[in-house]
Structures are given as C-alpha cells and as structure tokens.
Image (spheres, rainbow, N blue to C red):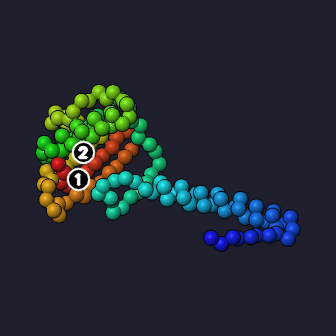
Amino acid sequence: MKNINISFSSPKSYLLILIIILILIPISSSTFSQSKTQKLDLMPYPQKIEIKEGKFRLTADFTIAIKGSGNERIYKSASRTLRRIANRTGLFLSQDFITHSDETDTCDLIISCLKPGRVILGEDESYSLNVTENKIYINAPKNG
C-alpha cells in the first residue's frame, strides 16, 4: 500500500480545498439522488418510464379489480398480491380475494387485459402502468 502525503504551504490552501469540497458535495449528492429515483423494481422492466409528481397513498380500503378477459391465474395472482401487501404493510385490507364480480371502477388498482396470457416462451408481456394520486392502472394486451 502506498502512503500519500499532502502538504499545504499556507492556510489559504486549506481554505481553498475546503471551499472546493463544500461545492462538490451537494453536486455529487444530487446526482446520486437523481439516479436513485430512476431505479424502479419492475419486471419485466419497461422500455420507457415517465416519472411525474404525486404519490398514491395505500390505505386499509385498498382494493383490486380485474377488467377484461383474464383467466383464473390472474385472479389468483392478484389475490396473492393483495395478501402480500397486507403482510408487508400490516394493514388489515377490506378485500380478502379478487373475483369476477369485483370488476368495478371504484377499486384502487385496476388491471385490464384483453385476453388471457399463456405460459410459453416469447409470450407478449408488455404492459403500461399509470399511477395517479387516486388509482393505479395496469393495462396489458395479454395477462393472466
């Protein structure tokens, strides 16, 4: 390991170095914080992301509905998601599981799919996710 010795010839050098450090710290921290906001844990990862202002607040009244031609697999998956949200947040959610009769626009998360997906290689997994302050929309040409 090499030793590095830095010596300053005058007190002005200390002041200059201190000023440079104080200028660089806010710039580097804002750069790192911007990169953190762009990191989203989504799968499959979207080709395009547009982040807007606002937040969706999760409450105990959170509900999920499936619109379209989803098969039983999507209802079971959405029910597991609902239970996982309850377990991770500690909220006692009012909806226990998702059924065909839950197809209503009054729900907080609306999953729309045109036709059921199949578990095969090369299946279209495209989707769009839109989060507003009042609702979450997931639109998929195929899902389930």
Name the spot of residue 40 as percent of width and height, x first. Answer: 40, 54
Q: Is residue 31 left or right of 45 when viewed as pictured? A: right
Q: Looking at the image, is 116 positioned above or below residue 6?
A: above
Q: Badges 1 and 2: C-beta atoms under 8 Å apart?
A: yes
- Tell me residue 34's x, y (percent): 52, 57
Q: Quadrant of residue 62?
A: top left
Task: Report the amino acid beneath label 1.
Answer: Ala
Q: Is residue 65 visible?
A: no
* Residue 117 appears in view: yes
Residue at image position (45%, 57%) is: 38
Residue 1: quarter of image: bottom right
Residue drawn at (33%, 33%) of the image: 86
Q: Which residue is the site of mark 2?
A: 111
Name the side, left or right, on which 70 lies relative to 128: left
- Badge 2 marks a residue whose secondary structure is strand
- Name the secondary structure under disc 1: strand
Pick whichever, 116 or 107, lies toward us: 116
